[in-house]
Image: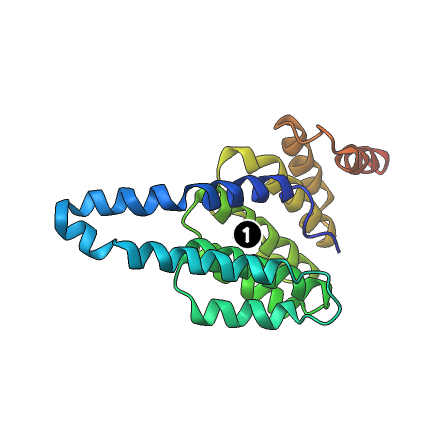
């Protein structure tokens, strides 16, 4: 199952932005609290804590692909012991990816749901919602997948959402709804670099009475 495909570049861009800008965010929050009192909450110890969160996150990511590393277990432990949502959300995404690799779709669903619920960036939330829907489709939870896809997401995700809705409708035997969803995906630039969508559209056209 390919859960991690069209959203990969979006995720990487978001992760880089979070990693590059966490210090600015923390300082901005301190200024927002005002003067000396703000800095008492966001002083050097807080900055050090964020750096430690980042280092711990990076250490786990670097273990991905190594035979002796149980990345899923490490990721779940990180989420349980850290509060920084910027990193715990990304760690939940990593945990979900590892769960998919282990064919543990129930665990992947759990991690993606948590990530979607806790992501503070709207694009990152959308990435997780789309991936969650893909897993729900594989679990044959079609109604749940459609509910997930019906939640608010940025317009840039429309093509992905509609194509996945089409996949759900096909699995449900609703060819007309699938055709409309695929066409809507195509109308929202979904055909760019995506030969699969055109194949789906053509395949439905061939079976039209």
Point out residue 139 in the picture as x, y percentages from the top left corner. Answer: 68, 64
Q: In the figure, is residue 186 to the left or right of 89?
A: right
For the residue pair 11 and 160, the one nearer the viewer reads as: 11
* On-image quarter of the C terminus: top right
Q: How many marks?
A: 1
Point out residue 172 in the picture as x, y percentages from the top left corner. Answer: 70, 54
Regarding residue 139, the answer to whether it shows in the image is no
For the residue pair 59 and 123, the one nearer the viewer reads as: 59
Residue drawn at x 86%, y 34% is 206
For the residue pair 175 and 89, the one nearer the viewer reads as: 89
For the residue pair 33 and 182, the one nearer the viewer reads as: 33
Residue drawn at x 50%, y 68% is 78
Q: Which residue is mark 1?
A: 128
Question: Helix, strand or loop at disc 1?
Answer: helix
Q: In the figure, is residue 21 to the left or right of 190?
A: left
* On-image quarter of the N terminus: bottom right
User: Pointer 1: residues within 10 angstroms few (<14), some, or many (20+)?
Assistant: many
Residue drawn at x 37%, y 60% is 49
Q: In the figure, is residue 129 to the left or right of 26?
A: right
Give the quarter of the image for residue 61.
bottom right
Point out residue 169 in the picture as x, y percentages from the top left corner. Answer: 68, 48
Regarding residue 132, the answer to whether it shows in the image is yes
Question: Is the image coloured rainbow, by chain, by secondary structure, or in one colour?
Answer: rainbow
């Amino acid at each position: 199952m390919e859960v991690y495909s069209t959203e990969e570049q979006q995720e990487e861009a978001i992760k880089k932005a979070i990693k590059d800008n966490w210090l600015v965010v923390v300082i901005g929050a301190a200024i927002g609290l005002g003067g000396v009192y703000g800095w008492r909450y966001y002083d050097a110890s807080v900055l050090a804590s964020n750096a430690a969160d980042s280092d711990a996150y990076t250490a786990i990511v670097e273990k991905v692909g190594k035979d002796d590393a149980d990345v899923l277990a490490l990721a779940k432990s990180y989420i349980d012991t850290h509060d920084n949502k910027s990193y715990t959300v990304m760690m939940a995404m990593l945990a979900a990816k590892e769960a998919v690799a282990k064919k543990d779709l129930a665990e992947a669903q759990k991690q993606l749901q948590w990530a979607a619920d806790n992501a503070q960036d709207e694009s990152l939330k959308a990435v997780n919602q789309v991936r969650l829907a893909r897993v729900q489709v594989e679990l044959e939870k079609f109604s749940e997948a459609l509910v997930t896809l019906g939640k608010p997401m940025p317009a840039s995700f429309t093509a992905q959402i509609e194509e996945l809705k089409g996949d759900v409708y096909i699995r449900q035997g609703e060819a007309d709804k699938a055709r409309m969803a695929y066409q809507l995906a195509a109308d929202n630039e979904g055909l760019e670099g995506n030969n699969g969508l055109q194949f789906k559209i053509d395949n439905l056209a061939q079976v039209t009475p």
